[in-house]
Amino acid sequence: MNNKKVIEDIVQEVLNQLGKSKLYGNDISLPLLYVHQADDEAIQMLKKKWEVTDDLKESVDHVLFCAVSQNTLVKGALGLADDPCSKLLATFLLNGKKVTMIPSKDLEWLLDSDEKDTPYTRHLLAYKEQLEKFGVQFVRLNEFTMLSTQEKSPSVDKLLTEKIVKSITSKNIFVRRATIVTPLARDTAKELGKVIKVIE
């Protein structure tokens, strides 16, 4: 008898009893994404997964800042809002919007902070960490598009099972903090060389 499979079945049944078993959503509409400073190629890539807008009057689901400069990084972390970009960032954070930042080319090292280790880089990393405490997520554009695909994956919101892990082709599987990850799903991900990453 496979105990892990039994546990997975029990978790699924509990979710069914709680009325949370809608793992496979049928919402056809794309989430609304506000994009700040993206090139046309990036916009076209994002439009495959999102309804992209530049209208600040619309109620957006997520905000993406592209080519984030050191100026925006520092001002955002310090809570300064004295230029258009930092004002936008402050407004979105104050309103509790999901914000993702893609660092500019000269700041991409922030995503692989082990590369550089000097007092100044540690200082800038502290600003990045402060923004993360505010709920900002830092990724590369290709990671963001994968994340958006995974966000709409039927498993992300409630339950990650072995079957779902096997069906995901990406090496990275993004789940929310509230997602239940079964032990069998963890073992399967490890066997397949996949990494389960928590978002938010």
Image (cartoon, rainbow, N blue to C red):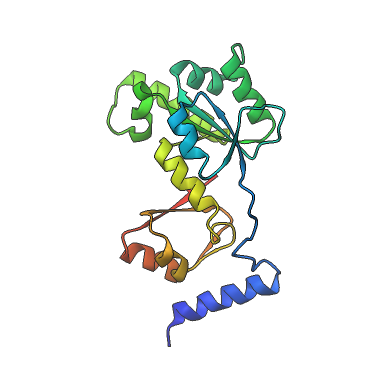
Q: Residue at x 49, y 31 (%)?
A: 101
The count of marks equals 0
Q: Position of residue 40 (x, y in %)?
A: 46, 28
Closer-to-camera residue (69/3)? 69
Q: Position of residue 146 (x, y in %)?
A: 44, 47
Give the quadrant of the C terminus.
top right
Dividing the picture into quarters, in which one does residue 36 lie? top right
Q: Residue at x 57, y 78 (%)?
A: 10
Dividing the picture into quarters, in which one does residue 88 lie? top right
Q: Residue at x 69, y 74 (%)?
A: 17
Q: Is residue 193 above or below residue 139?
A: below
Most extreme residue toward the bottom, as rendered?
Answer: 1
Q: Residue at x 46, y 38 (%)?
A: 45
- Residue 31 appears in view: yes
Closer-to-camera residue (44/136)? 44
Please give left or right for residue 134 compared with residue 185 in the image.
Answer: right
Please give left or right for residue 84 compared with residue 148 in the image.
Answer: right
- Residue 80 appears in view: no
Dividing the picture into quarters, in which one does residue 112 lie? top left
Q: Position of residue 179 (x, y in %)?
A: 56, 58
Q: Position of residue 151 (x, y in %)?
A: 54, 51
Q: Is residue 185 above or below residue 54?
A: below
Give the quadrant of the N terminus.
bottom left
Q: Is residue 152 above or below residue 71?
A: below
